[in-house]
Structures are given as C-alpha cells and as structure tokens.
Amino acid sequence: MQKLILYIQPQLTSTTVTQDFVRVDLMEEELITLTQVIQDIKDVDKLFTDYSKTFNLPASKTNNKIFKYWFNPDVIGFDANVFCEARIELNHFHYRFGTIQLNEVVMKNGSPSMFKVTFYGKTTNFKDKINEDQLSDLVWLNNFNHDADATYIKDALQNGKDIVVNSVTYTNAIIYPLIAHSQSYIFDATNNLDNGLNVSTAATNKDQRGVLPVDLKPAIPIKNILKAIEEQYSITFKTGEFFDSAAMNNLYLWLHRDKGSITGDLLATLNNITFNCNGPNCSHYNGISYPSVQFSLGAYIFTQAFTNSVEEGFKFTVNINPASNTIPYSIEIVNSLTDTVVATASNLTGSQSHSIGYGRFQTNSLSLNESRRLYARIRSESALTFSASVVCFHSFQEDDGFYDFELNATFATTSSSIVTSASIIITEQIPELKINDFLNGLFRAFNLTGFVDFNGQIVIKTLDSFYAGGQTQDITEYVKTDTHTIGEALPFSNVDFEYPDPKSILAQRFQFLNNRKFGSLSYIGDATKKSNYKIKLPFGHVLYERLQDKTSKALTTIQVGSFLNDNLEPSIGSPLLFYGIQQTSGTTALNFLESTRPTTYAALCPSGNDTSISSYWIPSNANELGTSTTAPTYNLNFGSEINSYTLTDYGGNNNSLFQLYYNNYITRVFNKKTRIFNFTAILPLKVLLNLTLDDLIVIGTRAYTINMMTIKLQSGETNLELLNEPIWKQY
C-alpha cells in the first residue's frame, strides 16, 4: 500500500495575497480513485484530463478550517463554486497537481461528519476559469485598436500593420484582407462602370469605383488571440509546441461580428492624450508621495486601499469643453484592467462633467482592495472637437484620527483640438464566440490534445506528436492476464468532419451542386454499423475565388472571399478562420479609393485619390499559394478540394486537416484488427510515478496505447482500457 498525502491551498481572503498548502486529513479506510484520459476513442473530439470519483474527507478540525465551516450558512468565507489548488503525493513523491471541488457536506446529529470532494486535473481548472466568457472579454486584444482612416486601412491592406505592445513587436497584427461583405469583387478592364467593386485599374473611370476603406474589415492573428487568453487568465501555453508551429503562422480570424459594413460612433480615448498639471498636489498623483495613486497617460491608477487608513475615498471627474454646443456626445469612464465601462453620461451637449467615486464617495461602496485604471473616452455621431481636464481627488484618515487628508489635482489636456474619429475597437468587432468554443474548434480542426506539465504550463500537441513522445513500458508482470475482456474499438460506422452550414454564395452553390459541404469529409470505416460520429467546427468556411478578367478571361493574382448569400445580400455566418497570404510581386494591380464612392457611377470624381495597389492580403484556405504540382503545406479543408488559386486537384497528397492530423489515428481505430482490451493490474509505485498517457504499454506479446486508466492510488490497483497496436511487432 502506498501512503497517499493530499494538500489543499485554502482560498484567499481579502487580507491574504498567498496561502500555503495545508495537509488534509483523510479517511483511514477509503481508497481514492483517479481516472486519466487524454482522448477517448468513443468520444473523439472531447478534451479530457485527470479526475477522481467523489471521495470523502473527515470533518476534522483541520478540514473544517480549510472549508471555513461552509456547512453553516451564517458563516461566509468559503465559495464552493471556486476550486481550490491541490496536489497529491504518493509515499512523499509528487504525483499530481490539480484542484479540489467541494460537492457537499454530510451532517449527522446536527454536526458535520464528512466533506464530499472531487479532484480534477489542471486542464479542468482552466476550463473552469474560462467558464462562459466570450472572445470579446479578452481585454488584451484592445492593444490592437486603431483609427479607421483610409491611410491606415490602405497600409494594412498592402503591408499589414506591426504593433508594439510592452516592447514586443507583433508582426502583421492587423491586416485588411480582400473579403467582401456587401457586394462582390469583380475585375473588368473594359466595362469599367460594371460594378462598384470592379477593382481593375485599366479603365478610364477608375476614380469612380474600386476598393474603398468601408468595403473592408480587419483580421487578427490566431496567435494573438491565444496570447490574449494567456494574459486574461494568467496561464501559459508552453512554447515550442503546436501553437508555435508553422501551421499557425498566418492563421487569422476575420472581425465580422455584424453583416455589412462596420458601424459605430466616432470615438476619442483620453488614455493616450498628453495632460499637464500645475499645483501643490500634482506630485501626489505622479507617484512620488503615494505610488499606489497615480495619473499617467490620461489614466487614474490606484492599486488598493491603504492598510493604515480608517476611511478612504477616491474620485475621478472628467470635464469636457467642446467647440460646438450642438453636437451630442457621451462620456464613458472605463476600467482598462477589465475593459468595462463603469460610468456613462449620455446625450450631452456643451461643457459637461461626469464623475465616479469609490469608498467614502459612493453610497454603494465597492471594495477598495481592487486595482483600477480609469480613463475616459468620448463618443459622438459626428466629429466633435474638444478640450478636456481631469480632476483626481483622494481622501483618507489615519488610524489615530489625527490626520485627515483631502488631496485634489487638475490635469488639463495640452491641446484644445482633440477630435472624435472612426475607431476600430477589437473587442467590439470580434465575432460572438465563447473562448471555450474557440479553443475546442482549434482542437477539433488539428486533432490536438492538451495537458498541464509539472511547471504549470499547458502543453498543446497534435495527437500523433503526443503519442510519439511516450516511452515503451512492459508491465506484463503486474497484469492479471488470466481474466480480461476484449470489445470492439468503435461503435459507429463512419466519422463526419464538417463545417457549419455555409452562408456565402460560392460555398452554398458548391453544396447544391455536389450534395456535400465544401471542405467536409466523411470517413467510412465499417458500413455494417448504422451510427455515425460528427466532428463539427464552430468556424465558417468560404470557397474563395481567384478573379478573372470578365472580358479577356485572363486570371489575375487577386483572390477574394465573399460573405454574400445566394441572394447577393450581406450575411453573417459563423466566425471565419482563414490563412492570410500577402501578394507582393508579379501581381495584378487593383484600384483603391480613399474617399466615398459616388451613388451614381457616372457622377463626378469623388474628392480623394485613387491608388494603384500591387501588394495586398488575400484570404485562402491554404497557408501558401502552392503550384500546379505541389500542394500548399497546410490547408483548412478536411478532404481533397480543388485549390482555388492554382485550380489544381492534388488528390491524396493535399495536406488536408484529415491527412495531416487525423489519418493515422482514424485509420488505426477503424482497422479490423483493432480492439479495446480491458485489464486489471497491481502497479507498484515506481510504475505509477512514471507511467504517462502517451506511453506504449506492452503486455505479453502485444503492444497497446492507453485509452483510459482508473487507479486506486493507495493500493495501485488499476483498470486499464487499452487499444491494441494492430501492426506492432515485439521488440
């Protein structure tokens, strides 16, 4: 028997920053059972982790203190909805990190008898952190907000925009790909007035049509969304694994939340505006007297309440002085740490002010033990020119009651000509998608698995690379081979890999003509079975088009996408994942307009310039163009499709999602020689401490991969659910 030791980290209180792990009292006779799964053959697209059967802990003095007498509803302190950090040791050797959830308390004669708890691995804890959060909750993404002016958009269409965040340069952090949202792109060098989105530069009236800024929407790299998740939830995806692979390098998400053009108010943010302050209290807010209270780059920053103060308060007041007294506007006070609007004053005209207070300055007091970074932004429907000032007020009283400080300072903008302008706020434009669904979509697309290593980092691998990293372990001597069961590997006949129903015209027409969704695949394993299994992505899938000259039929180098439905109306569809490819040399020039397209194409030339652009970002399902004989290295189709740029069918050498990430696994589990074997073993400590889910298990003359194992930790008794290797040869 191994000695099992369980440690739990008590939940933090408002007065604690860290808590040491506390050894938990265990039931003397109860065995704790742990189940470990990395990917269940019977539920292919689910992500699993370590988890235990519910087990009991005695209501001892130590355990009551950890759970803060939760069984008494009059005692507030422990939140059963928040998991506690935990770790398991076997004979004082580290075994697992994870979390403990309190399920219920068993009472006897009015007193607590035991606590029912469950241990979960770290990936479950990560899922719990994410909960129902949306991509729009990822505050860090707003580092890539930008002005929606023609110059910026043209540069992002041509070259992509590099953005520096905390001294780190994010290359091509914003691109504007050629994806149409309201009318289709065409190329016609002869009939120049055929269509507003005729992008040819050859015609005489090119100043009256072409690509306008309003015709485009931005896209952001998937890698930057993953970085935002790390920042939001204080987790780390281990570097050098799949999220850093070439398959992810130029993978983008199109910012298409609403159908048609991007709409919204004009905006001016004051956290990037220069303010000056004159007066005796300015140094207080410059972090000299009290570093926990600052005013920097238009933002009022305070960390937490002073521990030696009896009564404390903060107030933040924004004063706006517009040049016009007739243009309506709104003042929003924002906490940038959470990207939430904490106070709003709407439908204002003329000089106005708006405040927010904490502590002694508000009736419904919020906790002062909470960091805040407050700044103001101004919204208007038409351009508003204004100046601004901000008044910071800090008041507190010392414990002895002798000192009562009230310190205020006014910071004024150095310019009286701040103007609201069109801005792209990333979190306001990113598609509506849960973070959990986004990650699950990536896992399903690339057949990924994830686990937390001993350093607390989340390791993301393809299933093939995961199993390739394991060791071969012969456990024959510990297995009861006289009695075991053998069953079929899969209960279903085929696996369908598919995208959601298409909402774009070319993909819709493809489905009508071919009776299947573009990019989908159905793998038929055993036609005698009647059930099938679906792996469906949450991402949209578009059939892209390489433009031809409508008259000469010559192919251009311009590839475009379209989010118009079969009625040529703007559509929304599912969030679009695509590869962005920058066309830079030997390209067909396209026409870009930096002004408003006339309503009548025969009208006079609009004010602004038309520009011939020979460098631009095109959308693609492949990470590169490919050639007539060589397929791109990666693509987002599950099956073999004709490449929309080269117009080539690469057949079985297409580097599809199935070929690269699913083929080995799926063909193996559908092999007629593959079975599920169930064994019972008594594993000694040396095996338990070293056995991992990627290991190849040898029993007798056969080799197996682990589908699932359930271990009684103290006794080592283990139920093994194994998948045999049909072509393995004994070493």
Image: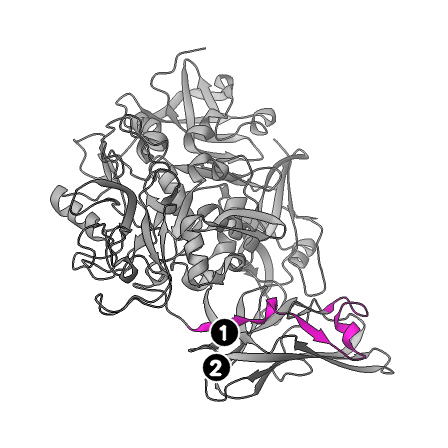
In the picture provided, is 584 more to the left or to the right than 280? left
Q: Amino acid at mark 1?
A: Thr
In the picture provided, is 540 more to the left or to the right than 705? left
Name the residue rendered at 43%, 34% in the picture.
462
Q: Tell me where residue 443 sits by quadrant.
A: top left
Task: Report the span colored magenta.
Answer: 265-293
Q: Is residue 403 above or below residue 144?
A: below
Name the residue rendered at 61%, 69% in the picture.
273
Q: Is residue 270 magenta?
A: yes
Q: Tell me where residue 557 sits by quadrant.
A: top left
Q: Quadrant of the N terminus?
A: top right
In the picture provided, is 355 more to the left or to the right than 428? right
Where residue 178 sits: x, y (%)? 33, 51
Name the foreground residue: 249 vs 11: 249
Q: Check disc 2 and report its element: helix, strand or loop.
A: strand
Q: Is residue 303 above or below residue 622?
A: below
Determine contact: label 1, label 2, CB under 8 Å.
yes
Instruction: Tell me the residue that label 1 is attached to.
Output: 420
Instruction: Tell me the residue that label 2 is attached to.
Output: 329
Q: Is residue 147 above or below residue 453?
A: below
Q: Amino acid at mark 2?
A: Tyr
Q: Residue furthest top?
A: 731
Name the foreground residue: 165 vs 315: 165
